[in-house]
Amino acid sequence: DPAPPFTAVTTQGDITFPADFEGSWVIFFSHPADFTPVCTTEFMTFASMMDDFRLHNTELVGLSVDGLCSHIAWLRTIQEKITFRDMSNVEVTFPLIEDITMEVANKYGMIMPGEADTQAVRAVFVIDPAGVIRTILHYPLSLGRNFDELLRIIQGLQVAAAFNVACPADWRPGERVIVPPAGSCGTAKDRMDCHEDGVECVDWFFCTKELSEDDIKAAIHHPSVAATR
């Protein structure tokens, strides 16, 4: 479905969502509250991985039901005082939405009464460059997100779109991919007699092919960011 539109005040100025991010992938996520420890580790990790996400033409947008002053004070505290693993002096430069009325959180289903009535759960929405929601994840208040998986989701969605393939369980860039995508049974059956380079079929419905990391980088990495790395 199209991502529900809204306008909001953020730590980086006013935004119109998702229109302001047209042409980019977006990870739009919520956290329960400012000045909480699990959320602090998540924001430090998001900020430290910004270049990795931007390499994949992906922007980050956060939200909680706290106010702008609270957001700013919390992010300043993170930068000035908090060390987590090998991260310190971490500056959060992606927008963090003020949502005191919970209007945006309710629009996206981020408030779950079974978990909390006045806090957003750890929701993640992956939105494509056309403003369409492609993935939704929900984590409980007590569990921080898996950031390797968030990046893998972006990589997998982009590879599937660029190469018309599907990605198997636990797939990582450079591993074999599935061809053709699930649901194209007739095409898959035809591939049993196909001699396309790199394609292997073990049965009519299960064909894979090689897809190198270099091919993926050439097709989906954002050139302006890649040039700086």
Image (cartoon, helix red, strand yellow):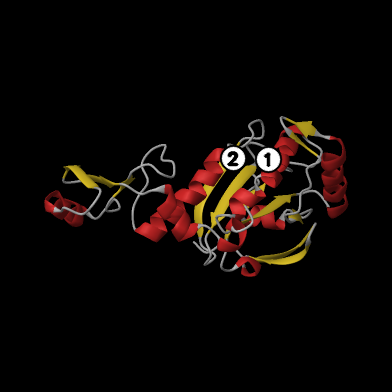
Q: Which residue is mark 2?
A: 147
Q: Secondary structure at mark 1?
A: helix
Q: Is residue 69 above or below residue 2?
A: above
- In percent of width and height, residue 40 lies at 75, 38
Where is residue 88, by image quadrant? top right
Residue displayed at 44% across by 60% down: 219
The percent position of residue 47, horizontal first and vertical second, equals 71, 46
Look at the numbered discs 2 and 1 and tell me whether their residues touch, using CB distance below 8 Å. Answer: yes
**Is 211 on the left-hand or right-hand side of 46?**
left
Any part of residue 31 in sight = no
Q: Quadrant of residue 24?
A: bottom right
Which comes sooner in the sequence, label 2 or label 1? Answer: 1
Q: Secondary structure at mark 2?
A: helix
Amino acid type for the residue under numbered disc 1: Thr
User: Is residue 77 found left or right of 135 in the rendered image?
Assistant: right
Q: Residue at x 71, y 33 (%)?
A: 38
Compared to residue 42, the image places residue 104 above or below, namely below
Q: Left or right? Give the position of 15 relative to 177.
A: right
Seen as rendered, the residue at the extreme left is: 193
| Marker disc for residue 45 | 1
In the image shown, does 181 or 113 lie closer to the viewer? 181
Foreground of the two, 3 or 37: 37
Mark 1: few/some/many CA within 10 Å (<14, 14-19, 20+): some
- Give, as a three-letter code, the residue at label 2: Phe
Q: Position of residue 185 (x, y in %)?
A: 20, 53
